[in-house]
Amino acid sequence: MNNIKYAPIGVFDSGVGGLTVAREIMRQIPDERIVYFGDTARVPYGSKSKSTIIHFSRQIVHFLRTKNVKAVVVACNTASALALETLRPELDIPVIGVVKPGAKVAAEATKNGKIGVIATESTIESQLYTQVIHSHNPKAQVFGKACPLFCPLVEEGWLKDPVTVEVANRYLEPLLETGIDTLVMGCTHYPLLRSTLREIMGESVNLVNPAYETARELKDLLDEQGLSNDGKLEPEGSMHQFYVSDAANKFKQFANTILPFGVDSTQLIHIEEY
Amino acid sequence: MNNIKYAPIGVFDSGVGGLTVAREIMRQIPDERIVYFGDTARVPYGSKSKSTIIHFSRQIVHFLRTKNVKAVVVACNTASALALETLRPELDIPVIGVVKPGAKVAAEATKNGKIGVIATESTIESQLYTQVIHSHNPKAQVFGKACPLFCPLVEEGWLKDPVTVEVANRYLEPLLETGIDTLVMGCTHYPLLRSTLREIMGESVNLVNPAYETARELKDLLDEQGLSNDGKLEPEGSMHQFYVSDAANKFKQFANTILPFGVDSTQLIHIEEY
């Protein structure tokens, strides 16, 4: 494979949630191959410090480079918020995260200028969503709210459970009071709670899923840089590859609920060695 | 410090929960010095695989050895259940975990022979509590139940919240139906939910906290092996030392709610290098 346009896209996340981003890429640009890495040994990232997130993300990018990826998508909101700007200058291939595309759409979608962001503690503390929204819409008011119980509830499978509804009511109440008309689901797990969030926020509030916007931005970026796969070269081996740092069955189970095909050949790697 | 009895005890956990074990050691054997390590960069361990838990635990034990500890206490139930037996033959100092002391007390405490164990998914799947209980009381019936939302709820600080009560009701209902008279709190976070657990299980059920029994077993072990600190040598530096793999403020905040004195001088180390 000499032509770089046939190289795969590297997509990584702290765990399985980033598969929602991989799924969007597969839908929107089906000719692109994906090498996915989920850091299941060290998940979650959401309450950890910036230096730890940078260290982990750097190892993962080093691993993805060994797979000759032509671009990297940071599918994890926390890593996008805390590590992306540090890693970008270290790389000679394009890197995009999920925060900027999501923030841009939210800034454009709001009519009353009031935007809510729900995300992990570390993402909220980073203030990156607020900064990017302000760069597009300086007058916007941004209300952030960390929702640390959402990921464990999704992983327990309690997507529409009364407990989850009660937790969501608690977290969202201060945002409802502000009168936001747009809410960014700033963690890859949260779109799986979409129907619960919709019920609490009401029909009139825009729910922004950064995964969708990220896949669109990736498509534009590949087109601009002449890196788009035209699908004319049959891939050697399987179209997509999946790697994890911990081989718990949970990854496959969760992956199979997200992706439209079975993730049978997930490979375990020692991420610390990269 | 030439005499090994003045050396510290190494205590480790996946994060902050093991401080409840450190606290019990400080209470029961106040002359002993502690070197505590919390793997806050890679927490939690509870849903990860055996090989990952062994790998992480081995690195931590290597780190603790650099502090010249005279014994190691695995304060994490998951690491005790999945890694301890693999690591013991690799070491020339005593190592004890929290599972065996907790299981022994439960086996002795039950009157009707029905024991419940609540713990992480990985601890329950390991079946170690069941095996050790059976070694003391072959006729006991052991009912395990993984409670993956308890740790996130404790870390959110919702100790007596209606949401926590509802989650606990859900998890404990199948155990209540079995008629157990003894319940092992098989994760270091769970004793912080003691009053909620007590309310649901009723006054007649024994709640076993392995932390207490572990400190007692440690005391006996040190006495037997002539390793007990007689307190006659003033320690150089501070009595106890605290190390973490991620320096998030959360550790200090949580530590200060558990320990009777401030944990000001927590030091960050790169655990992957051990």
Image: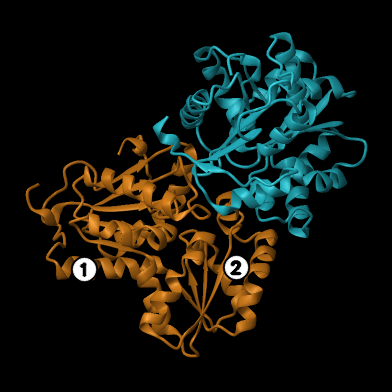
Chain colours: A orange, B cyan
Which residue, given by chain and number where applicable, does mark 2 sit on?
Answer: A196
Looking at the rendered structure, the secondary structure element under dot 2 is helix
Residue at the left extreme, as displayed: A2
- Residue A268 seen anywhere in this rendered image of the structure: no
Q: Residue at x 42, y 52 (%)?
A: A51
Q: Chain of mark 2?
A: A
Coordinates of residue B9 in the picture (x, y in percent): 63, 24
Q: Is residue B142 above or below residue B197?
A: above
Q: Can you say whether A56 is above or below A127 in the image?
A: above
**Label 1: chain?**
A
> Does residue B55 appear in this view?
yes
For mark 1, what is the residue? A221
Q: Quadrant of the C terminus of chain A?
A: top left
Q: Position of residue A36 (x, y in %)?
A: 32, 49
- Work out which residue is located at the far right of the displayed protein and give it: B204
| Mark nearer the N terminus (2 vs 1) | 2
Viewer-proximal residue, B54 or B217?
A: B217
